[in-house]
Amino acid sequence: MMFKVREVTVRNYGVFQHYVRYRRNYREVVIPRSAKAYRLHFIMAFLKPAILAAGIIFLPTPSMTWRIIGGILLALLISNLIYVVAHTRSKTSYLMNWFQIIKIVIWMSVIISQTTYYPCLVFYTEDFLGLYLLLMLFFLDMILDLILRAFPFYHQMYIPILKQPEVVEKLFKRGFQNYLETPLWSTIYPFFRWLI
């Protein structure tokens, strides 16, 4: 399901009474999958969360943040390796665009800057990391979107990097998108779509 935002309505009745309404055009795109791809995607829906959980439990670092990152990287590496060996395209390849890559680089830069490293994979994160992560969850998308709007390549930022079926690419070029780039949602939604 893809959609294009036609109109945004904002109502404000005071500090704690406001809402935003989006009017959208929807297009449903059905991409056929082979039986092999369907089976592999079904298996990966269980394998990726299991690898992530194993990384969080077994990675030998005291920092929970780095255990989660390590679990994500392990799940990403193993799942992509399986897809390459099986000659199957990931069902979430459409999620990777330049905007996501810039966000990942910023997230990792902040986390790395707030980490103290010791030998043998001992990583300690600083006390303020939680606050920085919370601020990025709520404000990074808005700030980054405002900054990138000043550049002529802004509309290319949301088009998937990996080649998609022709019908999907045409919809992206006409301004359709997969999900709303709203605070919190635009960080959590792609992660859970990839994970499950």
Image (cartoon, grey):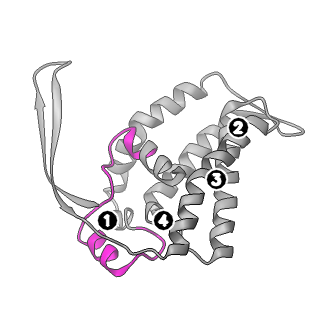
The amino acid beneath tag 3 is Leu
The reply to whether dot 1 and dot 4 touch (C-beta < 8 Å) is no
* Residue under label 2: 56
Tell me residue 4's x, y (percent): 21, 59
Tell me residue 161's x, y (percent): 47, 70
Q: Going from the N terminus, do you reach mark 1 or mark 3 first?
A: 3
Could you tell me how far apart the alpha carbons at marks 1 and 4 are, in whole angstroms? 23 Å
Q: In this rendered view, identify the residue nearer to me: 142 or 49.
A: 49
* Residue under label 4: 91
Q: Going from the N terminus, do you reach mark 3 or mark 4 first?
A: 3
Badge 4: how crowded within 10 Å, few (<14), some, or many (20+)? some
* Residue under label 1: 155
Could you tell me how far apart the alpha carbons at marks 4 and 2 are, in whole angstroms? 25 Å
Look at 45% across and 51% down and name the residue there: 190
Q: Going from the N terminus, do you reach mark 1 or mark 4 first?
A: 4
Could you tell me how far apart the alpha carbons at marks 3 and 4 are, in whole angstroms? 14 Å
**Residue 171 position by quadrant:** bottom left
Look at 74% across and 35% down and name the residue there: 57
The reply to whether dot 4 and dot 2 touch (C-beta < 8 Å) is no
Tell me residue 109's x, y (percent): 61, 44
Mark 1, secondary structure of its residue: helix
The amino acid beneath tag 4 is Lys
Mark 3, secondary structure of its residue: helix
Q: Is residue 138 above or below residue 85?
A: above
The amino acid beneath tag 2 is Ile
Q: Nearer the viewer, mark 1 or mark 2?
A: 2
The amino acid beneath tag 1 is His
Region rendered in magenta? 160-187
